[in-house]
Image (cartoon, grey):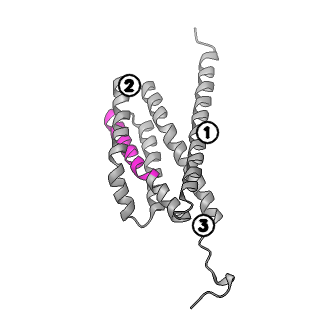
Amino acid sequence: MAITEASDAIDLSPSSTSLIGLDGINFFLAGMQAGFGPFVAVLLADEKWTQQNIGFVLSVSGLAGLLSQLPGGELLDASRSKRLLVALGAIVVAVSALVIALWPILSVVFVALVLQGLTGGVLGPAVAAISLGLVGHPALAERLGRNQRFASAGALTVTGLMGAIGYFCLIGQYSSPRPR
């Protein structure tokens, strides 16, 4: 059966809601991940951790992220729900941050940062896979560029907010009257 009218054609273009949602995911995921390393380093330094221990746990997190890329890609290929993997990855990052803030003990921080690092091998490729599924191969390059713009804006926003909060906390710390 041939399509005879333009109204019979199926519109395969993604909805604007889906594309805006993808913009938001890129913005907020990048913001979460950009703020994670500096947040952990400052928190652990405030807890009187040595520079060696801070560097160790942050390096292990980065190594876990590197090592998780190949199995993360396999997981994505096998998964039918990329959105579920992104949601689970975001939850892991958020829970890791909470655990580190509540229990800044070497073994707990080590496990939390390894879990956070492992999500790095899944989140970026999952967002790229979702992008491909939404826009297809012909528009993928443009979509990946847009993803990166929103990711950069998210990382910049979080970095700026963290800097402003840190600056104003330090001003309050040094401008308050000191007890005699």
Does the magenta-highlighted stretch encompass residue 11? Answer: no
Location of residue 177 with respect to 161 vertically, above or below: above
Q: Which quarter of the figure is the N terminus placed in?
A: bottom right
Residue under pointer 3 = 14
Q: Which quarter of the figure is the C terminus placed in?
A: top right
Closer to the camera in the image, 110 or 76: 76
Residue 50 in view in this figure:
no
The stretch of residues the image draws in magenta is 106-124
How many residues crowd mark 2 within 10 Å: few (<14), some (14–19), many (20+)? some
For marks 2 and 1 on the same chain, the one whose residue lies earlier in the sequence: 2
Numbered circle sitting on residue 49: 2
Q: Is residue 94 left or right of residue 62?
A: right
Q: CA distance from mark 3 to mark 2?
A: 49 Å
Closer to the camera in the image, 47 or 146: 146
Numbered circle sitting on residue 157: 1
- Tell me where residue 60 sits by quadrant: top left
- Tell me where residue 75 sits by quadrant: bottom left
Closer to the camera in the image, 66 or 143: 143
Question: Who's the residue at 40% across and 23% down the image?
Answer: 48
How many residues crowd mark 3 within 10 Å: few (<14), some (14–19), many (20+)? few
- Tell me where residue 152 sits by quadrant: top right
Q: List x then y, in percent, for residue 26.
A: 55, 50
Location of residue 67 with respect to 37 vertically, above or below: below
Closer to the camera in the image, 27 or 87: 27
Element under disc 3: loop
Q: CA distance from mark 2 to mark 1?
A: 28 Å
Location of residue 76 with respect to 34 vertically, above or below: below
Q: Amino acid at mark 1?
A: Thr
Element under disc 1: helix
